[in-house]
Amino acid sequence: MPKVSIVIPAYMPGAYLRIAIDSLVEQSFKDWEAIVVDDGSEEHISRYLPKSENVKLIRLSRSGVSVARNVGILNSSSEFVALLDADDVWLPTKLQRQLQTLEQNPNAAFCHTGFATIGPELKARNHLRENVESALNLNSSIPAVIRLALQNICTSSILIRRQCLSSSGLFDPLLSHSEDYDLYLRLLLHYEFTYVPSIQVLYRQHSMNTSANYQLSLAQGRRVFSRYRRFARMTGNADLDKSARLLFERLRTICGARAFDHCREDFRRREFFPCAKRLFESALIKPTYVAESLFKYVVGTKARLREEHHGAPR
């Protein structure tokens, strides 16, 4: 069996899937298999896949990302499991550097890497061919669950030891948001984690991202992190309690920012009622973020008006 199984859940991925698969073919580490799980797509995604024994396709009725990932994991048997979303891209040394890092850290259940955000354009990766070193350097004496809350982890950067999944379980099939941190926290009840301090993944942002649904993301995240806080208090695990609190606060900031971004888009389109609704939602989610954003907007607008006034012909 290959040393690494790469699980790719895919729902209506379009040509993004072909680019994701191309980034696997370009890996410097070659001992891998890819398991693409078609989560009820209405298109025939097989046309985006190469004819290769290394790439397998499993079709499901629409079941959600967690079920799709679990099916992919259960249909693989490699020593390591890597996760890749169908619209993201790996840089060529991603697997090689992660495997080297895990070999040097035998107590680590999983390894992640740095990532950069790209837009919906199909050819948005050309400017990031090199391995850009990250400034992230957290003290290893900090407990693992606290370090988890201080790092922003992209799911497509994860490489997990299969044997560790037997003690943590797989993804919660009822979750479509925060399912990744739910798994990480379960793994860290028993193990450590490590990371490669360089950008090895390009995370694609577009309108079809599941993360764009900030209402559902916040609701499921609140449920997940509240559950861990209750468990932490029952077991006296102060570090786990702090981690879950920090993770939820970061999620609130992200969801508040997404709601505010929608508000600005509505304002630019002069759709004032939806704009007011989004502004109210973002203020409820993260009032400090909204206040800071509005302050920056007012200050920036005044500065621009002053420049236009002074630059106008007299």
Image (cartoon, rainbow, N blue to C red):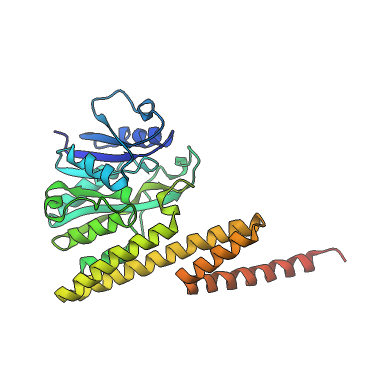
Could you tell me residue 212's position as x and y percent?
45, 53
**Considering depth in this image, is 15 or 220 the residue closer to the camera?**
220
**Considering depth in this image, is 35 or 21 the residue closer to the camera?**
35
* Residue plotted at (43% across, 34% down): 14
Q: Please, is residue 107 above or below residue 61 in the view? A: below
**Considering depth in this image, is 172 or 239 the residue closer to the camera?**
172
Q: Is residue 163 left or right of residue 52?
A: left
Q: Is residue 139 visible?
A: no
Q: Is residue 213 left or right of residue 171?
A: right
**Considering depth in this image, is 236 or 281 the residue closer to the camera?**
281
* Residue plotted at (13% across, 52% down): 164
Could you tell me residue 73's position as x and y percent?
20, 42
Q: Is residue 264 visible?
A: yes
Quadrant of image for the C terminus: bottom right
Could you tell me residue 146's position as x and y percent?
26, 69
Could you tell me residue 244's position as x and y percent?
28, 68
Quadrant of image for the N terminus: top left
Name which quarter of the figure residue 308 lies in. bottom right
* Residue plotted at (44% across, 62% down): 255
Q: What count of labels does the image hold?
A: 0
Q: Is residue 201 left or right of residue 305?
A: left
Q: Residue furthest top?
A: 51
